[in-house]
Image (cartoon, rainbow, N blue to C red):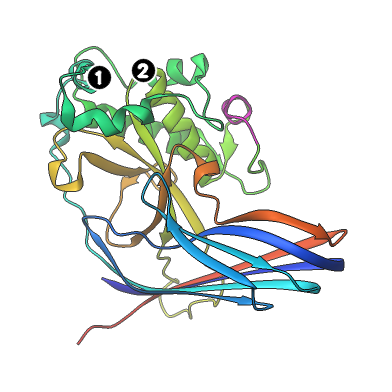
Amino acid sequence: MRYQVTHLTRYGYADPVSLCHSIAHLKPRETPYQRCLIANLRINPWPSVVREHRDFFGNRVSYFSVQQSHLQLEINATAEVEVWAPPLPEPASTLPWEKARAQLQSPRAVESASARMFALPSPAVPLDPLAADYARASFMPGRPLLEAALDLVSRIHRDFDYDPTSTTVATPIAEVLAQRRGVCQDFAHLAIAALRGLGLAARYVSGYLETLPPPDQPKLRGADASHAWLAIYCPEAQESGGWVDLDPTNDCSISDQYITTAIGRDYQDVTPVRGVFYGGGEHSLAVSVDVDRIALG
């Protein structure tokens, strides 16, 4: 599947901003099942400095500095991406989760060395005993790893309400567990905390999900949004580098409707746009996203 993605971010300021420094994770990354054909970033006002680098996780990071006075900052990211559906290992045929954990932690398992960091706590996903307790209902002794992970994802989907007014980017996992509601970021963080609490490796994935309008209805422009899910390290998923992406918001493994922008330990590693600015006073933020399927042939 091929897509055109447009992600427009606008900051408005009550008072002039004299200088801003920002970094953005807005250019899709390459994966075994995704190819980024074109990726551009247009910034208004025109920045004095623009650079791009790969971070520790292999994400494309754009840095820019606007060094002129401005009352509005506009960041327009466009990309053309080709995506294939990753194959899913047979869940019941994956290793028992305890054996997968032992293999992950073994110093002799060279192939899993890079995954071990994702079994450790991170700033937005500290180890939470309640999250680990929540996971144990799915991870019964001897249960195949992927079968248990899919069950965990299904339980989060059933037990938690999607409510965009209930949390912010800073809401802790303990609060999400207590109020049983949140958004895709919260559900991904909860699943990651639950898996790490059992000694398993899980990472945060940010990107986009193609949304389709109801039959005979036009697609609303700008109504799509950034999305978040998680990936669990599963030794049998060799074609995907050992990772299987799961989406608790929609109770599924990912398909060719998912576009990956960045991976990290949690949201803080892959924030779409963040930075510092001087001046400005009160400010507003508006974001619009369009994910459009490109007809081939």
Front residue of 207/67: it is 67
Rendered location of residue 6, percent (x, y):
49, 74
Q: How many marks?
A: 2
Rendered location of residue 148, percent (x, y):
27, 27
Q: Are marks 1 and 2 in contact (CB under 8 Å)?
A: yes
Residue found at x 48% / y 81%: 218
Front residue of 74/63: it is 63
Q: Earlier in the sequence, mark 1 or mark 2?
A: 1
Asked if the magenta segment contains residue 277, the reply would be: no
Residue found at x 79% / y 74%: 70
Rendered location of residue 37, percent (x, y):
31, 74
Q: Which image quadrant for residue 111? A: top left
Magenta segment, principal secondary structure?
helix
How crowded pointer 2 is (Cα within 10 Å; few <14, some 14-19, many 20+) is rated as many
Asked if the magenta segment contains residue 173, the reply would be: yes
Residue picked out by circle 1: 101
Q: With 132 as the anchor, is 146 left or right in this view?
A: left
How crowded pointer 1 is (Cα within 10 Å; few <14, some 14-19, many 20+) is rated as many
**Three-letter residue code for mark 1:** Arg
Rendered location of residue 273, percent (x, y):
59, 57
Q: Which residues are magenta?
A: 171-177
**Three-letter residue code for mark 2:** Leu
* 228 shown above or below 72: above
Q: With 218 as the anchor, is 253 left or right in this view?
A: left
Residue picked out by circle 2: 198
